Image (cartoon, helix red, strand yellow):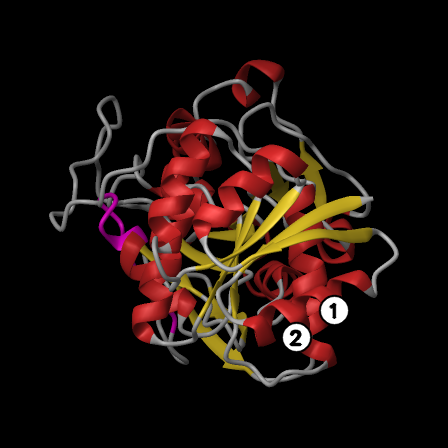
Amino acid sequence: MIRVLIVDDSPVVRSLFRVGLSGDPEIEVIGEAPDPYVARDLIVKLKPDVLTLDIEMPRMDGLTFLSKLMKHFPVPTVVCSSLTRGGSDKAMQALSCGAVEVMSKNQEVGRAMVNELVRKVKAAAASRVVARTPVPAPSLVRQKPAVGITLATPTGRMARGIIAVGSSTGGPEALTRLLAPLPAVTPGMVIVQHMPPMFTASLAERLDRQGAMEVREAKDGDVIQPGLALVAPGDRHLLVQGRPGHYRVVLKDGPRVGLHKPAVEVLFRSVAKAAGSDAMGVILTGMGHELLTVHHGHADVGEDQVDPFLVQDLQSDRARRLSPDTRKRPFQRRGAFLWTSAWSNDR
């Protein structure tokens, strides 16, 4: 049973969340708090498994509370924010502070919203959080490539290659750590992160400030090229079409796949079809039917705060497990490992 504490200053939202979560047999709502001060006392007393947290609240805002919480009493947290530019920016800050999921409160109240809330709470319950110091705001200056990686003009398979990345719960932090050390000559990347619309634009801007690669939200027709990482918009499936050296992004509407849109499976299958052996797939985090479908049931659980980390040959649809030594590396070193090993047999 997943024990949940709801923190929100709106009685209407608390009631909606309570009814929606209590309807799932695996979830128990153990308490409600109208502000962080009440929440603090209930967390110590009730020791919830998961927290749902509003950002805009009286007495203390959700970001300040989350920073204090993750430093002294870490609890898996689902942040609920308004679907606005300001709301999405704050949601990104919340993820930097340690939240494992974000959710929009602007969507129409109904079964879809309840189902999303239940999914995110279950995903948060399956995550692992540790005490952490708040991450400082990223510099607006693009950072230099990691030491030890020699830059060169992309040629051969590196110039035409594609790295497809799928990410879910805890993914924004994982993506930050993965992309930061990658050099500007890294093969083009296409990324699916399970997030609401608008939030993905803020995520792309945040990632763009972390390293040498350019990162932005994908647009239909974007050309995939070395040094560029394209993040799928939160309400569209991202597919890859084209031929070697001339791949482009196609954005499509359509039904959810494995409860998600964008869906990792849709991306991976299109990349495998278009690029074949020139493609490499990476699963950073995630759970559920979609990712199991991609890997035919194979999974590799890492030993870091963000797990698993899986490298896949998209053409053969087989997952390559990382060695225990590699899995124990700090995530920044994994980024270097990804770049140096992806095209070790360049042709």
Does residue 257 appear anywhere in the picture? Answer: no
Q: Is residue 138 above or below residue 78?
A: above
Q: Earlier in the sequence, mark 1 or mark 2?
A: 1
Badge number at residue 113: 2
What kind of residue is marked 1?
Gly
Residue at the disc numbered 1: 20
Which region of the structure is painted magenta?
Answer: 207-218
Q: Is residue 225 above or below residue 310?
A: below
Picture coordinates of residue 256, whole percent (x, y): 69, 75
Q: Is residue 211 magenta?
A: yes
Q: Secondary structure at mark 2?
A: helix
The answer to the question of whether label 1 and label 2 lie on touching residues, with beta carbons closer than 8 A, is yes
Picture coordinates of residue 300, whole percent (x, y): 69, 32
- Between tags 1 and 2, which lies in front? 1
Q: Quadrant of residue 214?
A: bottom left
Q: Is residue 287 magenta?
A: no
Q: Specify the quadrant that holds the C terminus.
A: top left
| Left or right, 4 with reference to 230 | right
Picture coordinates of residue 65, whole percent (x, y): 39, 45
> Looking at the image, which residue sits at the far left?
141
Residue at point 88% right, 56% down?
25
Q: Quadrant of residue 144?
A: top left
| Left or right, 8 with reference to 216 | right
Residue at point 48% right, 67% down?
243
Does residue 65 appear anywhere in the picture? Answer: yes
Badge number at residue 107: none
Q: Nearer the viewer, residue 177 or 136?
A: 136
| Left or right, 247 with reference to 124 | left
Q: Specify the quadrant that holds the N terminus.
A: top right
Picture coordinates of residue 93, whole percent (x, y): 34, 52
What kind of residue is marked 2?
Met
